[in-house]
Image: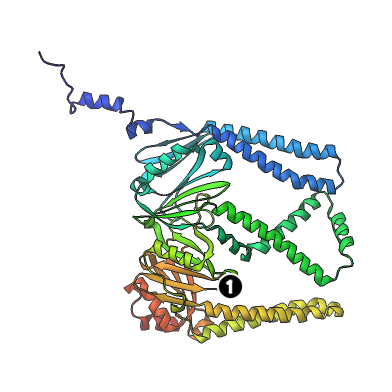
Amino acid sequence: MTGPEQPDPDHPDHQHAERRHPDRHSPDHYSRDRHHLDRRTVTASTIVAAGALVAAAVPTAIGMVLGGLGAGWIALWCVGGIVLGTVSTAVAEAVRLAVTTFRLDSHRVERRVRFLASTTTSIATPRVRNVEISANVVQRRLGIATVKLSSGETDGSRLTLASLDLQAAEDLRRRLLAERASTDSTEIARLDPGWVRYTPVSFMTPVFGAIGVGLVFQVASWFNAVPALVREVWERVDHVPIPLLVVAAVLIIGVLGTVATVAVFVESWWSMRLDLHRDGSLEMRRGLLVGRHTTLDGSRIRGVTLHEPPGLRGIGAARLDVLAIGVGLGKDENGQTKPSPALVPASPREVSVGVAESVLGVELPASGALRGHPVAARRRRHLRAVLATVALTAIALVPALVWPWLWWVPVTVLVVSGVVSWWIAVDNHRGLGHTVTDTVVALRKGSVLRRTDVLLRDGILGWNIRRTPFQRRAGLATLVATSAGGGGAFRLPDLGADQASVVWGTAGDVWGTAGDVWAHLSRGRSA
């Protein structure tokens, strides 16, 4: 006896049956199914919205009390607003959950929103380069997370799935990144709690402090309580000398700003760990209230930026950003927030330099090895300092001409602006520097916002040369490197002729000989 006849796999009828009944575990079967987001996202969003409304109700209630409103009105506005906002969020999230579906196959990730109109967003799976998994404290407790995908193009497509089961999000990351998600990795940075001591010297400290004071007056103004508040404060400090009042105001702003910057630092960088994979990809985990797990494709990295404002320079610290395609500040062409470029927070300079060398795979040029710029560049900065001082003093003369007893205002402005602008001019010129090696080009500039951009030569698309009439007379030029990473343009001002020719030579033979290019520039024509 013979067994049952086996179907011929090459027979057309058998192939047709396979198309009608694909394997349940195959990607084709998975692509046939559209999936909804996790239902727990409604609960998570509602709890977060309720918490935000409660936080907003506290200063609002204080402002109402200062404005003299009764307890009934305060309860109506605050409690009623919290309830109305919470219910509205729950309804909106339930609707979003019902109208949003997604699917994943071997070719693309697709999200569809079908409400009044149908909107479909998709990214080809081979083009996914960056994957970020984030979960706030509520989402973590519920076991869900938000997944953000971005392609490798500059300002390329981005797609957000909010929210998925946490394990499903990790499985999705591994599936999209394939070998990059599982290759051996080396830890190159981990948060040191002692780094929090660097946060008070940030420029954001006085900004946050001023914002905190401004919020108090803003809330009070909603209920016409500012005059009463100012009058009460003035009655308490009426007999205090003005210098002490100024010192007290600075201390209050400093304390508020320090508390805010420390809170932001802890929330953003809690449990930070940066890993480097064998293929050059980066994987970062960080965050306290909102946990973030980000993977960056190493083939998209074009360099790093070392930030050293005066406060950090004074204590030997720096912070590090990565220059990569599709990564940076602001929003992309689809209105989605780009992945953060931050790699290392404010920390000892040697830590940031060590991480940069690990990421780029080369040794960074020493700070003292950068080549300074000509004396003509220093003269330009001193001239700008003089002009700024004259302009500010002229403006300060106006009230003194109207009220002669304010003669001290222009004098004070002259002294303060003169000293500050002179220091900035000197420090700015000292900060100018560059160097070219076989693998990287390092560009340093700035004083208050000093930064050193270290660009991989393979990632430089070209150089733009700019010369104003004043620069031509001084024999100087400004070079702007074009790269696909970061902001796309990296400016280095006021180089001499011999320096510029060396730097723009990193773009290849397209520039011709240095003498010919500079001759064209000197005659004012485009190179």
* Quadrant including the N terminus: top left
Which residue corresponds to the image point at 49% horizontal and 37% vertical from the top-left?
164
Which residue corresponds to the image point at 77% horizontal and 46% vertical from the top-left?
60
Q: Is residue 251 left or right of residue 350?
A: right
Q: Residue furthest left?
A: 1
Residue 118 picture location, percent across and down: 50, 36
Residue 298 picture location, percent across and down: 38, 56
Pointer 1: what residue? Answer: 314
* Number of numbered discs on residues: 1
Q: Is residue 115 visible?
A: no
SS of the residue at dot 1? helix
Q: Is residue 79 above or below residue 273?
A: above
Residue 393 picture location, percent across and down: 73, 80
Q: Is residue 128 above or below residue 164?
A: below
Picture quadrant of residue 208: bottom right
Q: Is residue 161 above or below residue 303?
A: above
Q: Residue furthest top?
A: 1
Residue 437 picture location, percent across and down: 36, 74
* Quadrant including the C terminus: bottom left
Picture quadrant of residue 171: top left
Nearer to me, 501 or 355: 355
Q: Is residue 255 left or right of residue 523?
A: right
- Which amino acid, mark 1? Gly
